[in-house]
């Protein structure tokens, strides 16, 4: 799995950070940052869930 984001579209909902804090974080303005572009297999399910819950669909996943 390879993860990418478009932080310019972020609305600071924070769902991704709450679900997968090892993969996503927020900067001082609440904008998402990507901590791990290739998360380990045990995090794939929560990364997929984070992508599906993102209100602006800024998380892209390539398998």
Image (cartoon, helix red, strand yellow):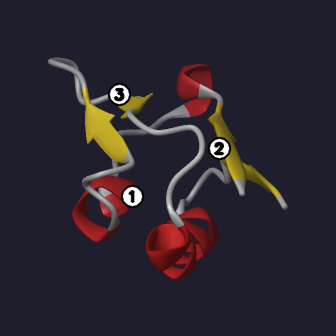
**Dot 3 corresponds to which residue?**
31
Q: Position of residue 2 (x, y in %)?
A: 71, 47
Q: Position of residue 12 (x, y in %)?
A: 34, 40
Residue in view at x 54 percent, y 77 percent: 49
Above or below 51: residue 49: below
Q: CA distance from mark 1 to mark 3?
A: 11 Å
Residue in view at x 38 percent, y 34 percent: 35
Q: Earlier in the sequence, mark 1 or mark 3?
A: 1
Q: Disc 1 on helix, strand or loop? A: helix
Q: CA distance from mark 1 to mark 2?
A: 10 Å
> In the figure, residue 18 lies in which quadrant?
bottom left
**Dot 2 corresponds to which residue?**
58
Which of these two is toward me, 62 or 52?
62
Q: Earlier in the sequence, mark 3 or mark 2?
A: 3
Q: CA distance from mark 3 to mark 2?
A: 11 Å
Q: Residues within 10 Å of mark 3 (few under 14, many from 20)?
A: some
Q: Position of residue 59 (x, y in %)?
A: 64, 48
Q: Residues within 10 Å of mark 2 (few under 14, many from 20)?
A: some
Which of these two is toward me, 14 or 43?
43
**Dot 1 corresponds to which residue?**
16
Q: Earlier in the sequence, mark 1 or mark 2?
A: 1
Query: Is residue 33 rendered to the left or right of residue 2?
Result: left
Q: Disc 3 on helix, strand or loop? A: loop
Q: Residues within 10 Å of mark 1 (few under 14, many from 20)?
A: many
Above or below 37: residue 59: below
Residue in view at x 72 percent, y 57 percent: 1
Query: Is residue 29 rendered to the left or right of residue 54?
Result: left
**Numbered circle sitting on residue 49:** none
Q: Disc 2 on helix, strand or loop? A: loop
Query: Is residue 42 rendered to the left or right of residue 56?
Result: left
- Name the quarter where the C terminus is drawn: bottom right
């Amino acid at each position: 799995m390879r993860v990418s984001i478009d932080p310019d579209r972020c609305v600071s909902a924070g769902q991704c950070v709450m679900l997968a804090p090892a993969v996503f974080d927020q900067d001082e303005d609440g904008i998402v940052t990507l901590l791990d572009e290739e998360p380990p297999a045990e995090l794939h399910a929560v990364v997929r869930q984070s992508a599906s819950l993102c209100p602006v669909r800024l998380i892209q996943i390539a398998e």
